[in-house]
Image (tube, helix red, strand yellow):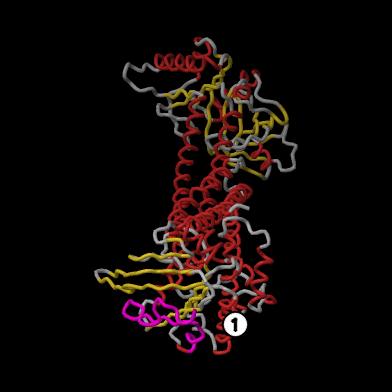
């Protein structure tokens, strides 16, 4: 399986007034297609920071990031936005759906920022909703859906452009056990269909659904490391 | 559909999905534009009215008024000046070429006119036969002062439309006897309805008697308030005015360096005074409107900026799903422009309706042209862009990683 992600010596710090906090000091690892990786760590260990770097929502201070073989470390906003749009899907703990916007339109949001017009956008969005079992609720707005349903809409949105990588930040954190299990099942099946999945969680039970667990501590990968335990 | 068209459509959808926020943001530009549109409609109406009054009351007339100060419009009260006399009028007619017609004019307020059990207090004019032609007035019924009336100082009277209506509500005034300051006069003619002059005088609230009747009987004094002159060639108006002035200075024995004790008013004075009045009004109202627009824009700008911070998570979602900085910028600028244009449409409709409403109630004048619509469009675009640029820039520059961390509002 080819590497989707290959990061080497990633570092990121934040400045708050005169205080500089080095969140990530030296992070290196790879993730290949079809792999389901969980990132764990204590609160404030830099899990979400790492996820933002991997999703090109933020830029590292040092290190290199090769995405599908291309070094995108210094790429411009337009290039990174296109990668986010075409190759990456995000799933957030708080679902992050647009309010007063139907499930269908939420799923279609990434098509808005596609380079070219997507002629069968609505049909594609309905297929994505069908994949997460929500096609009958396509016209419902987020306020009319349960938490589990909203998260499944968010997953359908992440899938609409058929990405190679799905980044999920505590995707079950706001869900009850049954809905959470459903979402994990869905992520598992997406990995099995060849996508790389990176899930950030503080919940060991959730992490154990992954193929590999990377634990971050003191700004570094403390265990798991660059070598995959389950290829 | 291009990417930018898709984003424009999405901006419209976003405005529609958040109706109350959109309407709230429209109120600022709407109020400012309403003020501007109402100002334009009513100022144009006023200017138009003044210009038509000037045209109605003649642009080929010179008027000499008693008193040396600038008197474009008639004095508001009787002043009892004793500086202008019939001999001055006759000298002008006799000595100045190009004077086609002339009439001495006496007038006085507070004249009581009684017809049977009805009475009015009005303003009386004593004039000669040419006055009605010089002033472009005419009779709706009966006749005006004749040369015979002047020669015989006849006790005949012509009534303005309002006076006639009040004294003879059922008509039949011609030939009736009325008492003017207790003396009997026969009603000889009724004037057509004239309305107000450019200076605001009510032409329908007056009576006219022959000049000789006025000077020997009714007012019983030799002094005049005015001399009105029709000039044969309007293009030589200024030259004729200067000659009149020179002649009167000699007749009134005014030495070099001394001020005139009369004022020669040319049609241009009326026009420029009226234009100046409406220009001053226009400038004042325009300033108020611009302050209103700025205030409206400021309110919308604050709402837009508040909107950016309320919509931080939404911006984060859009960035995460592939929006570039430029896309976010375009979306917010488009929303701002659409809100402002929407506010402009509401504002111009409300402003024009208010101005027309005030005009219908008789409280203002209104003239509807394309100007308020173009001005509203321009003002809306300016507000939309000015307000939108800042909000759009700050939205586009939000750190996407920080934006997605924000929890739902």
Q: Chain of mark 1?
A: A
The residue nearer to you, when weighing B349 against B311, is B311
Left or right: B395 as drawn, with respect to B60: left
**Helix, strand or loop at mark 1:** loop
The residue nearer to you, when weighing A69 against B1, is A69
For image coordinates 59% across by 79% down, the residue present is A189
Q: Is residue A181 above or below residue B174?
A: below
Q: Residue B105's quadrant in the figure?
A: top right
Q: Return the residue at label 1.
A: A146
Q: Is residue A210 magenta?
A: yes
Percent of width and height locating residue A10: 35, 69
Query: Quick check: can you spot residue A131?
Result: yes
Tell me which segment is drawn in magenta.
Answer: A205-231
Q: Is residue A170 magenta?
A: no
The residue nearer to you, when weighing B277 against B28, is B28
For image coordinates 58% across by 76% down, the residue present is A190
Percent of width and height locating residue B360: 64, 48
Left or right: B97 as drawn, with respect to B302: right
Disc 1 crowd rating (10 Å Cα; few below 14, some 14-19, many 20+) is few
Percent of width and height locating residue A163: 56, 68
The residue nearer to you, when weighing B76 against B393, is B393
Percent of width and height locating residue A109: 58, 65
What is the residue that sits farthest to the left in this orientation? A18
For image coordinates 44% across by 62% down, the residue present is B305
For image coordinates 49% across by 58% down, the residue present is B324
Left or right: A70 as drawn, with respect to B142: left
Left or right: A225 as drawn, with respect to B36: left
Q: Is residue B304 above or below residue B105?
A: below
Q: Residue B67's quadrant in the figure?
A: top left
């Amino acid at each position: 399986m080819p590497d989707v992600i290959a990061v080497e010596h990633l570092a990121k710090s934040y400045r708050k007034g005169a205080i500089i906090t080095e969140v990530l000091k030296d992070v290196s690892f790879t993730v290949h297609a079809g792999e389901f990786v969980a990132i764990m760590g204590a609160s404030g260990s830099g899990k979400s920071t790492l996820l933002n770097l991997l999703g090109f929502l933020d830029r590292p201070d040092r290190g290199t990031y090769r995405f599908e073989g291309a070094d995108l470390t210094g790429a411009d906003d337009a290039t990174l936005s296109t990668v986010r749009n075409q190759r990456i899907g995000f799933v957030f703990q708080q679902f992050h759906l647009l309010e007063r916007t139907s499930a269908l339109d939420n799923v279609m949001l990434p098509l808005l920022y596609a380079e070219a017009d997507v002629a069968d956008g609505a049909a594609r969005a309905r297929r994505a909703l069908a994949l997460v079992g929500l096609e009958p609720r396509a016209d419902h707005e987020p306020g009319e859906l349960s938490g589990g349903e909203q998260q499944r809409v968010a997953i359908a949105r992440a899938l609409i452009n058929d990405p190679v990588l799905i980044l999920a930040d505590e995707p079950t954190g706001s869900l009850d056990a049954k809905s959470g299990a459903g979402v994990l099942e869905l992520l598992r099946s997406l990995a099995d269909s060849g996508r790389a999945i990176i899930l950030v969680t503080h919940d060991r039970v959730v992490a154990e659904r992954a193929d590999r667990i990377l634990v971050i501590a003191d700004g570094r990968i403390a265990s798991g490391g660059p070598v995959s335990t389950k290829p | 559909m291009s990417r930018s068209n898709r984003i424009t459509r999405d901006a419209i959808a976003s405005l529609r999905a958040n109706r109350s926020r959109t309407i709230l943001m429209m109120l600022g530009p709407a109020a400012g534009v309403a003020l501007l549109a109402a100002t334009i409609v009513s100022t144009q109406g006023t200017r138009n009215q003044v210009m038509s009054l000037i045209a109605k009351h003649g642009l080929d007339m010179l008027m000499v008024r008693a008193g040396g100060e600038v008197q474009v419009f008639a004095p508001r009260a009787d002043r009892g000046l004793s500086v202008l006399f019939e001999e001055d009028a006759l000298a002008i007619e006799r000595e100045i070429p190009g004077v086609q017609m002339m009439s001495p004019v006496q007038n006085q307020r507070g004249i009581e006119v009684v017809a049977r059990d009805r009475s009015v207090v009005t303003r009386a004019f004593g004039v000669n036969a040419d006055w009605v032609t010089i002033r472009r007035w005419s009779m709706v019924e009966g006749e005006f002062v004749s040369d015979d009336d002047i020669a015989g100082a006849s006790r005949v009277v012509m009534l303005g439309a309002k006076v006639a209506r009040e004294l003879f509500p059922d008509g039949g005034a011609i030939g009736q006897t009325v008492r003017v300051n207790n003396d009997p006069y026969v009603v000889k003619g009724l004037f057509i309805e004239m309305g107000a002059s450019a200076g605001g005088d009510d032409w329908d609230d007056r009576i006219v008697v022959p000049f000789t009747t006025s000077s020997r009987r009714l007012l019983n004094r030799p002094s005049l308030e005015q001399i009105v002159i029709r000039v044969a060639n309007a293009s030589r108006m200024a030259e004729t005015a200067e000659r009149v002035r020179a002649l009167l200075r000699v007749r009134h024995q005014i030495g070099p360096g001394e001020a005139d004790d009369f004022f020669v008013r040319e049609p241009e004075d009326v026009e420029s005074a009226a234009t100046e009045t409406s220009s001053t009004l226009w400038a004042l109202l325009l300033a108020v409107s611009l302050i209103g627009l700025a205030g409206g824009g400021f309110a919308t700008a604050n709402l837009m900026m508040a909107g950016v911070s309320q919509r931080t998570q939404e911006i984060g979602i859009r960035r995460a799903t592939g929006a570039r900085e430029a896309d976010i910028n375009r979306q917010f600028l488009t929303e701002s422009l659409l809100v402002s244009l929407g506010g402009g449409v509401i504002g111009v409709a409300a402003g024009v309706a208010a101005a027309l409403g005030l005009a219908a109630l008789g409280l203002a004048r209104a003239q509807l042209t394309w100007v308020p619509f173009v001005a509203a469009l321009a003002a809306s675009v300016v507000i939309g862009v000015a307000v939108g640029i800042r909000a759009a820039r700050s939205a586009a520059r939000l750190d996407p990683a920080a934006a997605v961390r924000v929890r739902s509002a």
